[in-house]
Image: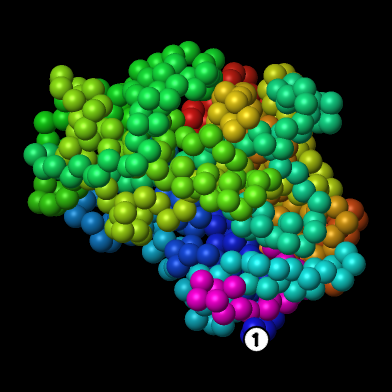
Amino acid sequence: MSRALAADLVVVGGGLGGVAAAHTAARLGRRVILVSRFEWLGGQLTTQAVPPDEHQWIETGTTSPSYAELRTRIRAHYRRNYPLSARARRSADLNPGLGTVSRLCHEPRVAAIVIEELLSPSIASGLLTVLRGYSPVAAERDGDTVTSVLVRHRDGSEVTLTAPLVADATELGDLLPLAGIGHVIGAESAAETGELHAPDLADPLDQQAVTWCCALELRIGEDHTIDRPAGYGHWRDTVDPRWPGPQLSWTDVVPDGLAIRTRPLFAAAPRSAEHRTDDDLWHYRRILARRNLDPSFPGGEITLVNWPQADYWELPLLGVDAETHRRALAGAREQTLSLVHWMQTEAPRAGGGQGYPELTLRGDVTGTLDGLAQEVYVRESRRIRALVTVTEEHIGRLMRGDTGAAQFTDTTGIGYYRIDLHPSTSGRTYVDIDCLPFQIPLGALIPQGIRNLLAAAKNIGTTHITNGAYRLHPVEWSIGEAVGALAVFCAETGSEPEAVHGKPALLADFQRLLTGTLGITLSWPDEVRVPAARHDSIPLDA
């Protein structure tokens, strides 16, 4: 027998989109139930262990105030609790790891703590209930309405959830098949979308590589070599036709143009626990830098492994049977562990020799015993068939020229990231496309033919191509924030999401809630929107 809980909004999925949706609706006075598979909230920022990939305007006033608050709180945590160097304490834009992928490279554990602090007042007030350790297993519909969602705890207990509005913020769009909601997986055809870079034929199994990330610390003079994984020889020796050699190598390809490059772990031999050379993998996603810390700090430097060497593309996660799905996840884990073992034992070492046995897995940083992230980093989800679908023609520079991205009258926020698709399970290599600063249309959050379910993560109305730009941290947060605000607006006006989208007066009132109460920017300034020169996001291969 299951328990039953009701709220104004049920959010299934504890990633950044789900957190933002729940936080927004609760702070606006509505009762919310947030369902998370994990104890930690935050998804790609925490349980998937990916430092935030962000654009070059993230520190400006165009950023969502609530996302800016999250970033400010993360910096404040380091200032309050860490023995920072004098220089780091003076830094207004403190970057704990000094990684080049982001202006704010930090430990996943810290982000999880900060998200708890952010949500704590809403939990204390009773407006927000967080169900941890639960996953959706069923959804009931009455015609075009989702009437309930059944979630199951890892101990087998179940809870039936009901609300006027339900948000799917899961990493893979799990509610969509459970509720029988139309969706797309993999790649659409060029004939369907009109996109320049879409394949000629639709391919549901054309899904981006996933990555099982891990945290590593450098402990000079120590030996932390892990056991050789059972499938190590496969990962060390297999050469994919689209790759210059085995993935267990310092050689890969540049996503933009596919030129072969060599990027070692360290560009120069490390002589201490502080490493200062920037042109290497270690510095790329470093999340704790010794130069930011007082010399008395006993720990070493820590980096996050989310590199091409750990991209898993042998089997897809979606559109396959449960056993294939399980094998894909197991393969991604084994590949990352094989990469770690290779780095410790066989990798060419800067200055000569082989192996860095002084690398040690830091599971305390990722919240696990084995040092790997709590879940695999997912770049691609099921995607709703939405009222509005964002295509390459809306945001791709090659298709639009220098006129700026399409302007959506139903905009709910803004974002920017290069269209960046990793090698896929169908054999495609990188698809890397120059992109224009874009908007997030309300219609992309609303499925066709469903009155009360909203997409709140990577499952919105994008294509396989444009998902590559809408999948990163600040955009996912803004998607969730718009969903939370829409739930409140619908409750207060007695409207339904499709009516808000379709009626100009309602849409204008909703957008005033976004801009006035929440301070959200709905359009890029002209000097950003219509670029005079190419704009690149900071990372090139997230």
> Residue shown at 11%/42% (left/top)?
222
Q: In front here: 286 or 535? A: 286
> Residue shown at 80%/59% (left/top)?
180
Residue 449 image position (x, y, % from top left): 88, 56
Q: What range of the chain is rendered magenta?
A: 152-167
Residue of label 1:
1
> Residue shown at 72%/47% (left/top)?
383
Q: Amino acid at mark 1?
A: Met
Note whether 286 is above or below 520 in the view shown: above
> Residue shown at 63%/72% (left/top)?
151
Residue 146 image position (x, y, % from top left): 80, 68
Q: In front here: 116 or 321? A: 321
Q: Quadrant of residue 260?
A: top left
- Disc 1 is placed on an element classified as loop
Q: Is residue 126 left or right of residue 396?
A: left
Q: Quadrant of residue 191?
A: top right
**Is-magenta flag for residue 154?**
yes
Q: Is residue 381 left or right of residue 254?
A: right
**Is-magenta flag for residue 22?**
no
Q: In front here: 11 or 481? A: 11
